[in-house]
Every structure is written in structure tokens, then in C-alpha cells.
Amino acid sequence: MLNIFTVHPYLISLIGAVCQTLRFLARIWLPSEDEAQQIEKRNPFILNVLNQFVNGIGQGLLFLFGVIMFDSALSWILGQWVYTDWRYQLPSVVLGLILGLQFVFDTLLKKPEKLELIFASVLIAGQIYFIHFYSAILENLKDQFTLALVYLSVLAVCYAIFSTVQYIIRNISKTEQKKQKSKNQNQQNDSDISRKTPKYLWNIEEKYNKIFTLKWDIILLIIITIEAMLKLYGTSLFIW
Amino acid sequence: MSSRGKSGEFLSNLRAIILKAFLTILLLTPVTVFMLVSYFDVMNEPDKHRPWVSWYDDPAHQIYIGWETEDESIGTVYLGEDPESLSPEKTESTACKIHHINIEGLNADTLYFYDVRIDDESIGKGQFRTAPTEYTPFSFAMTSDTQQPKITKGHHYRIAKAIENRNYTFLSIVGDHIDSGDDKQHFNNFFKTASIYADTIPFVPVIGNHDERGRMYWFTRYYPNSINKTVIPDFPNGQFYWSFNWSNVHFTNCHFTHGYSREFTDTQMDWLENDLKSAKDMPFRIVSFHCPIVGSGFYGRNENLLNIMLPLLKQYNVSAVISGHEHHWERGLFLNEIHPDNDITYLILGGGGGAFDPGLRPQPETIIATPTPCYTEVAASSNSLTFRTLTLEGNLIDTFFMGVS
Ligand SMILES: [Fe+2]
Ligand SMILES: [Fe+2]
């Protein structure tokens, strides 16, 4: 065992079930992508900025919990714990790998720009440092969990600020483009506009959406909710 | 917009909201039902419990049988070495609800059968073995923190099923039997689950911080093992410490639930020192208390236990120290500078039923740790103890061997 703090797979199923339920609640109550675009057009700019910030906090938390889940599953695979209780742990580990990756890609890594990728890397590095190494200097884990909540909130706010600033910059450039377009209605300026659209390092959105469909999400929700309930009875999907 | 258009929009909005509300209810119902069913399951057991067995300090010749009835009643214990011919051993003198019949003058190393009867109607049968006076092989089980949080049933039930037919001489529960010591419903739930094994496996109770809530009132009503200990302001019902010998092992059970300074009373510390002194010729000495000296979970390193208890354990050459409190299982080692041939193994047995620690940070003394449902069995031979920690499906998590030092 390495003498560092590691989140245990036991927690994955509980965090995963809560996150997946909240994702579905958001899906039910928040407007769809098309509706959101309509609302964005109707709303004043400041309200859209505020909306982006609140959304950013939710997205940030999902990203951060995704990292925790993936990191915990990986720690188990790398042998931080014993393997002989695999029937209890393995379902959480598998779900941690799948959901952890999905949360991280869903929020930031489906089609990242260079700046976004740098930001994601900094967030992940900060979180890994806090989970595994910062905890070593704390007296007891009770302090750590209080601090972890503060730390997670700060990182989520950072995420929200980052996405809000990006939203503002994109909007300003869009407005400039519109102004320019109205000044010079010719082919040359059209190509200028295309140059100013975001440059993604990769774009797997289409493929991603084909794999991680609504059906997939519902199946994962059912599996992880059952696993979380079984965990609270000291059992798991692999124990029958 | 015409009024028909407006009402059409209103209706479609209303339909959308009703659909969303329906989907929300659909989404949240399974978890809510799960929690409610667990809650009512945990909190609605009757005040009626089948017999359990434990003892004070001489299990070779004395045991007590406890049980609980909903109404005040007078019970009789029938006892014998042949289950087919039990004879009346003792009848209570006054009617009560929580009963204990103390039986003395038993033969050592003997298997006894009992039947508890009220108005000649059996309310529970069982068996127990008295301790041997010579070194005889035996095996016992240990776990801790069987407490059930109200919103789930926990897994004490699964521990009970796993040990049910294992013929352990006794089960030591190192604290936190229940979640709220001041709420009788929690004890009802505990004894209902424990009745799966309590007819064949006696209890060796150690007090935990959750057990002592409500000034230890209910805990000491069910387990009078530590009666007549000095009453002091911090502990108006006394402290729960007691010890006994079984074959070649001396068991010392102390009252350190948080490791707070107020728990290190002169009375307990004097008793402990005398107890360890008197057990110095025993091949093995196992000391149990709820709060671990060090642990990888929530509580980390306890300075009081490190500074006061650990030197004492080293001085009196204790073989192993057993704790709970942190909700994971852990084994580690304290180097013993006073007796270098006998480093002290510590175990944390928090895999007994409660919700687990969400993560661990191993201490320098930690050898192995994991939050998983498990219990530990110990096989004692004349010159060794073999510890085996098992998952509830029977997979071996860890094993280690201890010879006489
Ligand atoms: Fe506990
Ligand atoms: Fe405790």
C-alpha cells in the first residue's frame, strides 16, 4: 500500500448514483439544446452570462467527480487495496471507469480547444495533488473531508468562471463578426468569419453522441442505482 | 394572440410540466422506497428477543443467559449436558422485561444446552461451551461496528449468516453494536439480527462510542458484564471494562471509545495495569478497546492512546490489540522496543455492518487495509494464534500467524 490517501471504490457507486440522478433531473427540467438557443436569443446578455456561470458550477462538479471516480477505480486496479474482495469492489471499479470517463468527456473533452485542454489538465493535476498528497499533511481525515468540500467548491467555481469568460469572449467575437459582415457583404469577409470559429483539437461529439445515447444513460442509471443500494446492504451486483 | 391560442399554449405547458413531474417521481421513487423500507424495517422491531449468552470474568464456571420479553414475566432456565433431558436450573425471583439469569458452578470445558421457559413455554433454546482450565484448542470470531444506519439495513445480517454455522466459541464485537445507544429500537434491531447466531455463539461485548450514548443505559441493561465498576461524574453508570481467560489466551476489554483524556480514569488504568500484570504468565494477551491507537481512516493517530496505552501494552508484552471505530478493516504492527521478539499486531475490525470509510490514508504502521464487509476468525492452538480475515462470501482477505513470545 502506498502511504497516500486514496478514495475507495465503495464511494464510486454512491457518488455515481447521485451524479447520474442529478444529470437526469437536469435533463428533465432544463431546456433542450434547441430550446436553450431560442431562450439565449430572447434573453438579455447579462442573464445569459449568469446562466452560463450557474451551468458551469454544475458542469464543474460533474467533471471533478468524474476525475475522482476514475482515479479511485484506477487506484484499485493498480493494487492500492486487496483484490480478494473483488466481488464487492469490481462492479464499482468498472462503473467508475465508465462513468468517470463519461463525465470528464461530457463536460470538457468532447471537442476541446487548446485553452480548454490546458485548463482541464490543470484542474486534474490540482485535484490529484489534493486527493493523494495534500491529505498527507492533515492531522485526520475528518479535517480533510471538510477541506475537500471547500476545495471542490473552489475548483467548481474556477470551472464556472473559465466557461463564463469563454462564453463572453465568444460572444464578443461573434458580435464583431456580425458588425463586420454588415459592413462588407462580400465573399472575402465570409471566409474571415469561418477563420474565427473555435478551433478544436479534436471533435468526437458526433461519435460520442452515437455511443452514449439516452438509452445507454438510462441503463447506466439503473445499474449504478442498484449497485449503490446493494453497497449499503454490504453486497454488490457480483454477489448473489 | 387569440384566447384559444393562449389556452392551447397553457395546456401544452401544463402537459409538459406534468410529464416532467411524472418523470421526476419515476426517477426518485426507487431510492425513496429503498430508504423508507429500510427505515421502517430497522425501527419497527418488537421489544422481544431470544436468549443470548455472555459471562463476567470466569467463563470456565459461570455464564449468564439474557433475553427480553414485551411484558414483565418470570423465566426459568433449564440446563443440561444432554439436550434431550434438561432440568430446571434457576428461576427469576422478580418479574422484569430485560432478563439475566446468572448460572454459577458449571464444569469447565463442557458443552451445555439450555432452554428458557416462561409459564412452561419455551421462548428460546441454545447451547454454549464453558472455558477449559487447561490449554485446549479453540476458535473465536471478532468483528466491530455492526451498527445499522437508519436509512439502510447495513450488513450485520450478512455477517450473521456467514458465522451462523461456524461453531465459534464466542463472537467478540469491539464496539458500536448499534448506531444510537439512547434509542432502544436500535438494540431491538441488533438482537433480532444477532438471534441468527446467538443461540450457539456467546457474545464478548466491548463498548463503543455509539453504544455509550444515553449514559450507557441500554447497553449495560443488555450486557451487565462490567457491573459494579466505580461510578464517577464523567461516567455515572461506571466504565465498561472487564477481562477473562479462555484456554491460553487472556482477554482484556477496556473502555476507550474516543480515546479522550476523561476515559483514562485512575480506576480503569489501575485495573488495567493489575489485570495485565496478573496475566503475564499467559501465553497470549489480547487487549480490545473501540478507538484505535492509529488507523488509516477518519480518526488517524490518537495521541492519548499513543502516549498512555501503547507504552503500557509494550511493557506488559501484549500479543495483539483489537479495535473498531474506523469503518474499514486494517492490520498493522507496533514495534516493541521493550520486548523486541514480540511486536504488537493491531487490528481494526470496522467491516462489521456500518457504512464504510470513503477512503483511506495508510499510516506508517499499516500493513494492509480495506473497507469491505468482513469478519476475523482466530484459531488458538497450545502455542499459536492464527488470524484469518474473511469476506462474507468466504474469500480470504488476510491471514497471519502468531507464536508464543
Ligand atoms: Fe462505528
Ligand atoms: Fe465508533
Image (spheres, rainbow, N blue to C red):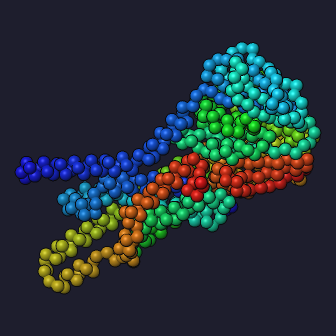
Instruction: Pinpoint residue B324: horizontal percent, then vertical percent.
Output: 69, 43
B294 left or right of A69 in image = right
Residue B243 visible in this rendered orientation of the protein: no
Q: Looking at the image, is B69 positioned above or below residue B362?
A: above
- Among all residues in the image, which is located at the extreme left? B2
For residue B200, say whether it is visible: yes
- State the quadrant of the C terminus of chain A: bottom right
Residue A46 vertical placement versus B25 (above, below): below
| Left or right: A126, with B147 as reference point | left
Give the vertical position of B292 relative to A169 (above or below): above
Q: Is A168 on the left-hand or right-hand side of B346?
A: left
Numbered circles on residues, count: 0
Nearest the eye: A40 or B201: B201
Residue positioned 61% across, 31% down in the render: B188
x 21%, y 50%: residue: B13
Q: Residue A138 versus residue B37: which sits nearer the camera?
A: B37
Query: Residue B84 placed where, x, y %?
Result: 81, 30
Viewport quadrant of the N terminus of chain A: bottom right
The residue positioned 28% from the left and 69% from the top of the image is A170
Write the residue at 56% across / 60% down.
A91
User: Left of B232 or right of it: where is A10?
Assistant: left
Which of the 4 image quarters holds residue A82? bottom right
* Residue that sits furthest to the top in the current view: B94
Q: As drawn, which residue projects farthest toward the front?
A: B84
Depth order, front residue of A95/B33: B33
Q: Position of residue B16 (x, y in %)?
A: 24, 51
Residue A76: horizontal and vertical position, in percent? 61, 62
